[in-house]
Amino acid sequence: MPAAAPPAADTRILDAAETLFARQGFAATTIKAIGAEAGVNPALLYYYFPDKARLYHAVLERRIGGFSRGALASLPAGLPPLEAISRLLRGYSAMMRQAPVFPRLLARELADHEAEHALPMIRQLAAGIFQRLCDLIRAGQRRGEIRAELEPRFAAISTVAQLAWFHVAQPAVAVLLGHAGRIPPKEQDRFTEHAVGYALAALTPPARAAGRKRARR
Amino acid sequence: MPAAAPPAADTRILDAAETLFARQGFAATTIKAIGAEAGVNPALLYYYFPDKARLYHAVLERRIGGFSRGALASLPAGLPPLEAISRLLRGYSAMMRQAPVFPRLLARELADHEAEHALPMIRQLAAGIFQRLCDLIRAGQRRGEIRAELEPRFAAISTVAQLAWFHVAQPAVAVLLGHAGRIPPKEQDRFTEHAVGYALAALTPPARAAGRKRARR
DNA sequence: GTCTATAGCGGGATAGAC
DNA sequence: GTCTATCCCGCTATAGAC
């Protein structure tokens, strides 16, 4: 294809809507603002989408669907559990970097979970990444590489929470780290590596018996 | 005082506004709905508050102020760092339980951080709990009870992230844990204890030399 | 497919009676 | 302090020209 054809009107509308919904939320974003951001007449929106709510759904589905597929795709089968968990965390970080709009959409959906649109998205994420992480932790426990006394689902939450919170709470985290605006990419990378180390330290048994299987008991 | 005098009108308005802002967000909550929820004429709102935005600020200040003060109050000075960190986490959980509305207000503020009202709240939280936790981690490192290679601020984020995410992401977490609606209190308690254990395992040095100071460099 | 014009409703806020 | 009545604005959505 020739160099970067300008996107079609419906894509421009979706992009504009995503930007504004993430920044301001559903109720505070007007049809007119979306049209202006997309460089399109506001009424055109109703040619492509039935109403504002379903435009919002389309935005979520496009973004969340891509996220779920991407996160799991970065995981070749057959890796040792601890290695797979490390990759999952790094892959998660990379995806957040690629789509900085995602944490804000997610934060809104979490706050809005009583609204009808939120649940399917949450269910999809839970069934995807979270479930996969749980399975990895159980596998690690069977091999004696992860502490047996951990409840796998709790451990999965704690492990993913580090990165999830780091990204969702960016404004708070930035203040804590002493940055005025956004957190620079280099610092994000450093945190990702820290998070991997923190998780591994929390998951693995204290005795240095990871090499031998089940040294005692 | 005699048994539970009905709260004054301004308090009823604040309570109603808090409920609705947490449930629906600022933009989606109408003055009329607040009046109805408070059992008060909507116009009365403008007798006590200049406008909708400042009513929202009042809601945040009342809730956040109380939260910050409460979290730090549960920490007597002079405790050993690891003990203090455990207490901080348990205190944090207890406060979230007392004020279930807090995580949702927080999630909204994080998503809305470009709006003018969010920053002071975030700054207050950062300067309070987060900062305190950083100091505790540094103290633990000096005593050799916490791994020296950890960046204290990163470690503080990871530690608090477990509980912060658990509460802010309640709807997602509930789905993951297999609960249809809310997470039962007992399960919340179990997660809190898990989080304390997970954090201590991640923070403390792998060698079992916590008793002796600096066993080997 | 894209735009103009506008209907119709519901929002925030105020004036003023009581 | 509390309520009634209402103004005015901006929003979503539609009709229909091009």
Image (tube, coloured by chain):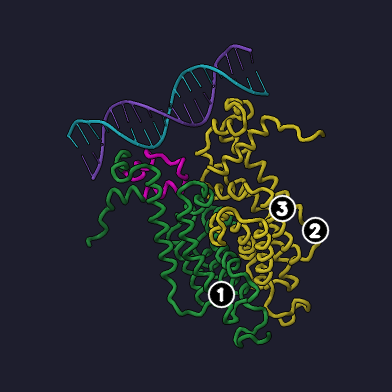
Chain colours: A green, B yellow, C purple, D cyan
Q: Using the numbered discs, state the Cα–Cα distance from disc 1 to disc 2 in whole angstroms.
A: 40 Å
| SS at badge 2 | loop
Residue position for label 1: A138
Q: Amino acid at mark 1?
A: Arg
| SS at badge 3 | helix
Residue B67: image location, x then y, percent: 69, 48
The reply to whether residue A174 is in sight is no
Residue B44: image location, x then y, percent: 61, 26
Q: Tell whether position B23 is magenta.
A: no
B197 shown above or below B116? below
Q: Residue furthest front?
A: B180
Q: Are marks 2 and 3 on the same chain?
A: yes
Between marks 2 and 3 in the image, the one whose residue lies nearer the viewer: 3
Residue position for label 3: B71
Q: Horizontal placement of A51 versus B147: left or right?
A: left
Is label 1 in contact with label 3 (beta carbons under 8 Å)? no
Is label 2 in contact with label 3 (beta carbons under 8 Å)? no
Q: Amino acid at mark 2?
A: Ala
Residue range highlighted in magenta = A15-39
C7 shown above or below A47? above
Q: Horizontal placement of B166 versus A89: left or right?
A: right
Mark found first going from the N terminus, 2 or 3: 3
User: How many numbered tags mark residues here?
Assistant: 3
Between marks 1 and 2 in the image, the one whose residue lies nearer the viewer: 1
Determine crowd level at label 1: few under 14, some 14-19, many 20+ residues with C-alpha closer than 10 A: many
Looking at the rendered structure, which numbered label has been put on residue B77? 2
Q: Camera-side residue: B197 or B176?
A: B176
Q: Camera-side residue: B144 or A12?
A: A12
Q: Camera-side residue: A208 or A134?
A: A134
Is label 1 in contact with label 2 (beta carbons under 8 Å)? no
